[in-house]
Amino acid sequence: MSKSIYFILGGILLGALGGYAYWYFIGCNTGSCPITSIWYHSAAYGAMMGGLLGNIVTPGDKKQEKGNDTTDPDQKAP
């Protein structure tokens, strides 16, 4: 597996734990909050947000400098 999948899975795990912790410590007393009134809704929302954040911070390939690029799509082959 590539390195980036570990960042995404770690984000999902941390997000789910954070969502559950939010429900446990803060939550919604009235029950009218659609996300934080039920623990698994809060954990699933946290997992989704953690996965998205993990996808953003994944280490990628370094971009090539513009002057070092040997393939120019505008040039025609001789």
Image (tube, grey):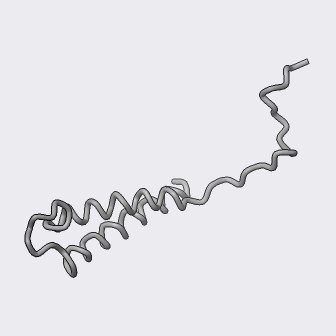
Height in image: 15 above or below 1?
below
* Coordinates of residue 60 in the picture (x, y in percent): 62, 55
Which quadrant of the structure image shows residue 13? bottom left
Q: Residue sitting at 41 percent across and 61 percent down?
A: 9
Which quadrant of the structure image shows residue 36? bottom left
Q: Nearer the viewer, residue 26 or 63?
A: 26
Residue projecting furthest to the bottom: 25
Q: Nearer the viewer, residue 6 or 44?
A: 44
Q: Residue sitting at 35 percent across and 67 percent down?
A: 15
Q: How many marks?
A: 0
Residue projecting furthest to the left: 30
Q: Residue sitting at 54 percent across and 54 percent down?
A: 2
Quarter of the C terminus within the rendering: top right
Which quadrant of the structure image shows residue 3? bottom right
Height in image: 76 above or below 68?
above
* Coordinates of residue 45 in the picture (x, y in percent): 28, 60
